[in-house]
Image: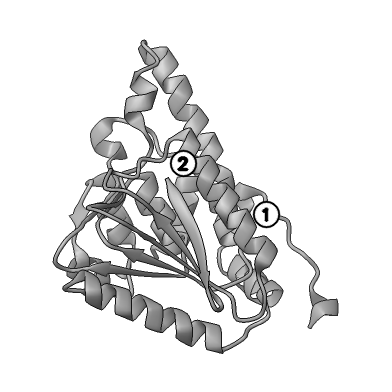
Amino acid sequence: MCTLEKRDDIFILTFTGADEHRLSPTLIDSVLSALREVKSQATRGSVLITTSQGKFFSNGFDLAWARAAGSNSKAMERLRFMVQSFKPVVAEMISLPMPTVAALQGHAAAAGFLFSICHDYVLMRSDKGVLYMSEVDLGLPLPDYFASVFRDKLHSVSARRDVLLRGAKVKGEEAVRMGIVEAAYDSEAKLTDATIRLGEQLASRKWKGDVYKEIRKSLYPDICGVLALDEENIVSKL
């Protein structure tokens, strides 16, 4: 599951426990509820940090739950249900009125990888954890909004190719070189310190959330088009 806590201006969303943090319908609902709570409490200077406990940040959708349906067709129905259920989570991340930071303590795969790069900043460990889009290896098509996030977020054509068409397992230092993450640290303590430091720096700027949100949305037109995120007129708020 996940927890949400607030430390001054910083909201911290944590995937709890020592499991793989698979995005089951229950966990998806929990994350969506947390993000909506964060949005409802947002003020100037708010920042969201997302992190995890254990070996995994998130290992993607709960494929075991899908397969437990008992047949291939029913398993695909469950998988499609998770894909559709997760779409509002991505929409909330792109339209959240505050800076967002993902701290990857461990592996981030498939939908977990996607969720991480929906944040404005991604930090990870260099000593543990990989980024991995498993769809090509599993023989699963890429949902439209997954493709839009990677098009808008990974500007390097070769990086997108290697991640999506080769199923590359990318470690920390390589992820930095590929432009996927901001920085990589060789211990959990260093990652945590750097994440909190970045969060505090961002919070100190006291940006207007609505303005920040709209600027972010303007940077990612492909994502916003696929997610049908309506633009808001914020001229009166400036």
Percent across and percent down for residue 237 are 81, 78
CA separation in Å, label 2 and label 1: 23 Å
- Relative to residue 30, is residue 57 drawn left or right? left
- Residue 217's tag is none
Residue drawn at (34%, 20%), measured in percent from left and top?
A: 67
Q: Secondary structure at mark 1?
A: loop
Residue drawn at (46%, 64%), measured in percent from left and top?
A: 119
- The residue that label 1 is drawn on is 229
Residue drawn at (73%, 62%), measured in percent from left and top?
A: 231
Residue furthest to the right in view is 236
Q: Residues within 10 Å of mark 2 (few under 14, many from 20)?
A: some
Q: Amino acid at mark 1?
A: Leu
Residue drawn at (28%, 43%), measured in percent from left and top?
A: 19
- The residue that label 2 is drawn on is 27
- Relative to residue 60, is residue 227 drawn left or right? right
Nearest to N terminus: mark 2 or mark 1: 2
Percent across and percent down for residue 58 are 33, 49
**Against 113, is 77 above or below?**
above
Q: Secondary structure at mark 2?
A: helix
Q: How is the image coloured?
A: one colour
Which quadrant, please, contains the N terminus? top left
Asked whether the beta carbons under mark 2 and mark 1 sit within 8 Å of each other, the answer is no
Percent across and percent down for residue 55 are 22, 53
